[in-house]
Image (cartoon, rainbow, N blue to C red):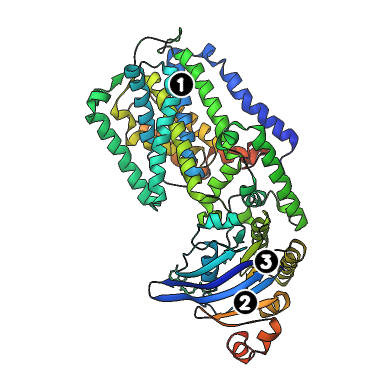
Amino acid sequence: MTELLTVEGLGVRFAGLTALDDVSFRLSEGQVRAVIGPNGAGKTTLFNAISGYVRPTSGRVLLRGQDVAGDSPHAIAGHGIRRTFQNGGLFPALTVLENVLTGLTTETPGSFLDLLLGRRRALEAERAAIAKARALLELMSMGHMADARAGSLSGGQQRIVEIIRTVASEPPVLLLDEPAVGLSPVARAQMMEIIARLTGEKGVAVLLIEHAVELVMASADRILVMAAGKRIAEGTPDEIRADRAVLEAYLGHA
Amino acid sequence: MSISPATLRLRTALFWAVPVLACALPLATNPYTQFVLNSMLISTLLTLGFNMVIGSLGQLAFANVAFFGLGAYASVIAMNDLGLPWLATIPLSGLVGAAGGFLASAVALRGIRLYYLAIVTLAFGELLRWLYIHADRLTGGTDGLAIPREGFLGFRLGDDTAQFYVFLAVTVVLVKGTLNLLRSRLGRSIVAVRENEIATASLGIPTARVIVTAFMWSGFLVGVAGALFAAHIGRVFPESFGLTQLIVGFAMVLVGGTGSVLGSVLGAVLLTALPEYVRAFPGMEEIFFGLVVIVVLLCLPQGLASLLRRLSPVFLERHFRE
Ligand SMILES: Nc1ncnc2c1ncn2[C@@H]1O[C@H](COP(=O)(O)OP(=O)(O)O)[C@@H](O)[C@H]1O
Ligand SMILES: [Mg+2]
């Protein structure tokens, strides 16, 4: 398995608060790594530091060996690390299809003049992007929703569209921040199937923040447990399940 | 409900039918109605440019009236001092407006947004007006500048009918260009920035460049409108580019429909025609204007364009090209 993402000694300090403290891990092609821990543990901060939304105060983020720490969010997304947002990141006024198309922006070439004049080059790229977006929506059983305003969808559907949009450009690394929160059991199962398909068929490496323990245990290859910005445990689901400290503190089995 | 090919063909036909039919309008006008028609075309470009940043990008950037003035002064100064023919000053004024848009976007990119952006850009407009008054060597001060009488290749600048055809051609080209942009990945990115700037960046979209581009295209449209305005009035002076003009432009955007090209046209045409109808009741123009704005916005909060959208999918404005 090729190693895609390497996080080394990553730290983030906000005025006085150490939100992320010396966190390291590796993520390989096709692997799912779950990140768990109580609220305020620093999970989202870890995502923000990797994806460029927060400048790390220490450490490195390597994508295929190349350090991307400190790059801007759009540059990091351009390199192939893409993420979703804990509170949802869809564009409500755009349709589902348009939302997915925004995920293909970096693959839709054409200069400003090409777009302004509606030149063939731009139109062909646009047509190709539309075909790809429609195919993706079909594949994920969302084709019938293509022309609906994203804001009119149910919470679960929005989460799924956000993931489709995020993976549309086939990024090698995907960061999902609590994708299953608020989902019905059916939608949650669908979400898990989508993640399994992405890792199994496309070899996407997934970093997954998730609270639902059964979901994490069932889908993750490895688990990183965090508390107060620090890594407190790391291992396979079985190892984590056997870790009494983790069990008592975070998995509610005490 | 995807838009059918038949609907798309109808939409294209309707789009081109409007300017083609408009070509016949001068047959039915008198000098006064011709003047009003020409004003409508200028207002259309002004509103289109204003709507780009206010509606599509969702930024309260009120500097656009200032770009209108910049374009108008640039056109007249280029004619008087550089000896350029008026037609050649149209793209020049657009570029001057775009440069103004670039400056305003720099303010927005420094994190000055919402009401703060509104105030800063308003102040920018007032500052320019102060400049028009005090840089009188260049601008003629409060008296303003007159455009030259001579024409170009037989084109008489003062001829309202000739102006109409030039205005119409320029407006159609720029409306079409703006539609092209809004239906492209750039238009989607502009709306995406309005809806969620942080999430937009996560898709590899350079949000700063999107904001700069939207401001500059907006400035270009408004600057071009300024060049047309200079020829239309025959004179530019500071008072044309004050707060009243700004409020009228803002009302046109809202009444037509934010983020809608169709809305820009409808809002500009309606609110340009309206004051002319109530001329008969002196002193009542502003009240009537205000009343119409209020009534339209109460009945159609999304503007006039939303009414047409409800009537037929022909009027749906999507941000991709079917
Ligand atoms: N931008 C920020 N500025 C200051 N403090 C922050 C910021 N983002 C997060 N924090 C703080 O960092 C800690 C970790 O938060 P977060 O990463 O959101 O935790 P989690 O996602 O695990 O619930 C919290 O105490 C939070 O208040
Ligand atoms: Mg979080």
Q: Do labels 3 and 1 share a chain?
A: no
Amino acid at dot 3 = Ala
Within 10 Å of disc 3 (Cα), the crowding (few <14, some 14-19, many 20+) is many
Residue located beneath label 2 in the image: A211
Q: Where is residue A64 in the image (x, y as percent from the top left)?
A: 62, 63
Q: Position of residue B72 (x, y in %)?
A: 37, 26
Residue located beneath label 3 in the image: A205
Residue contact at pointers 1 and 2, CB within 8 angstroms: no
- Which marked residue is nearer to the observer: mark 3 or mark 2? 3
Mark identifier at residue B38: 1
* Mark 2, secondary structure of its residue: loop
Q: Are marks 3 and 2 on the same chain?
A: yes
Residue at 45 percent of width and 7 percent of height: B154
Q: Nearer the viewer, residue A142 or A73?
A: A73
On the picture, is B43 further left or further right than A30? left
Q: Do labels 1 and 2 share a chain?
A: no
Within 10 Å of disc 1 (Cα), the crowding (few <14, some 14-19, many 20+) is many
Examine the image and state in which quarter residue B63 appears: top left
Q: Nearer the viewer, residue A59 or B306?
A: A59
Q: Mark yes or no: residue B280 visible.
A: no
State the CA–CA distance, disc 3 to disc 1: 60 Å
State the CA–CA distance, disc 1 to disc 2: 63 Å
